[in-house]
Amino acid sequence: MKFVAFWLSGVMITSCAQFKSPTDPYRRISSVEAQYSVEDLQLEMRSKFQTIEFTTLSAYEGLAKFDEHLDSSPGPLEENPHYAGLLAARAQIEDLELSILDLRNQLYEGVLNPSLATDERLKNIELLKSTIPSSKNDLDALIFQHFHEDFLSFTKQILMDLTKVDDEVVKKSLEALYTELNAYYGPLEERKSMQVDWRTLTVKARHGLKENSDWLTARRSYQHQALEMLADLQAAKTQKQVAPKFFPSPDRAGNIVGTEFPAKVWSLTFDDGPGESTSKKVLSHLESHGLKATFFQLTSKVKELPAIAKAIREGGMELASHSYTHRQTPKLSLEQRDWEIQTAASDLAVLHQRPIKFYRLPYGAGVSNPDIRNRIAKANLIHVFWSVDTLDWMAQAPSEIVERTIKQMKASRQDAGVILFHDIHERTVIASEEIMRYLKQDSRRVCTLEEIVSAVNRGASPCPAN
């Protein structure tokens, strides 16, 4: 496809191409040349949306099997045969989502660019429409949940930008797009409160696809990546013995998992934020329970939502880096790896005006990669994995997240470890508070990573019981 060649090679980018900043290794494209037709892009987007749909359906099948295995054979994550596949599915889904949203934003830059001709700006609007997934029923809302959340913010942005467009023809077309988007997705609050039965929906959808060759191909497409994820999990498994010290290192001392913590010591961690409407709610729950957590933040999100990031900082929470943009580190160039590790942490430290000591790879991908681990250590950071995964990135009832989390906690060797949440989902707001209540029982201690590292390195006991 012509568009694929354009997008991947980068050789046919227009004069409007630019970088987000002088050191940003990711190219920004603000318009698409006229020879790339709407039909070409529609075809490419349909393929990507189908892959997201099929991979998500496979992931829900894996989630059901993960829970079944947890019930029958509770134990560490790396011993659950379905977990690596879930990590790989999430990475593939989010890579595709990120590529679509990046393109949408680049096209939108062209729409707002007054130096472009009216026809080119109108063409960008037509191309932009191809990046909008279906939203016809509950299954669509389940499959494309992240798009629903993002397009609500994007729709609000269009409304604000309409006043800045002085070309009346472009403005009229953009107003029509705003109206279409506003009606197409519906209020996000309704989507948040909708309790979809993901098991019934996804089983029925998979049954209808069992003879579809594209479905079978999609199911196999991330199996190689699942093997890579399994290698990372096996690398984390070596952490079961107590490490005498934690410090920046490409070796065992530079990778915290949680299985090496003293008995009844837990670290509560939140990734991918700050979230526009969710992080402050999580913060409020932590404060009401008198607990501290570690927030592994995306530097790009902190720049986008500085007030929310400030509230978390001023709430006394621990701040850590989760990369700049949440791309899969093993797939990046060396320059991009430095951007996502070193630059992300140093920029985050400047934004928060405090040192950043801990780093978490997106999806945990690359924790067994010597080059990546060396770059993390060179940035004077300690990598942090996890021992309990709530799997809250998948749309489901909060009660399911709570049940799964507690089962994993009970299966831990010493009633201790690192719990992984994501403070960008409404379901996480509800589920995480229930886990906060559970953590305050039975003399458990909830400590920040710095409290644990400092105490373990001194041979002392981390933080008092809650």
Image (cartoon, grey):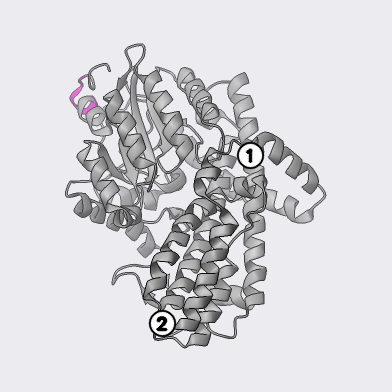
The residue wearing badge 1 is 60
Disc 2 target residue: 16
Q: Residue furthest top?
A: 442
Q: Which mark is residue 217?
A: none
Q: With respect to residue 5, does 202 lie above or below?
A: above
Tell me residue 289's x, y (percent): 30, 24
Q: Which residues are magenta?
A: 456-460
Overall secondary structure of the magenta section: helix
- Identified at 67% across, 69% down, the residue is 43
Quadrant where the image shows the C terminus: top left
Q: Left of 432 or right of it: where is 193?
A: right
Q: SS class of the residue under badge 1?
A: helix
At 39% from the left and 17% from the top, the residue drawn is 414
- Image position, residue 20 (x, y; %): 34, 69
Does residue 151 show up? yes
Mark 2 to mark 1: distance in Å? 41 Å
The residue lying at 51 percent from left, 36 percent from top is 391
Please identify the quarter of the rendering in which residue 428 is found.
Answer: top left
Instruction: Tell me the amino acid under the disc marked 2.
Output: Cys
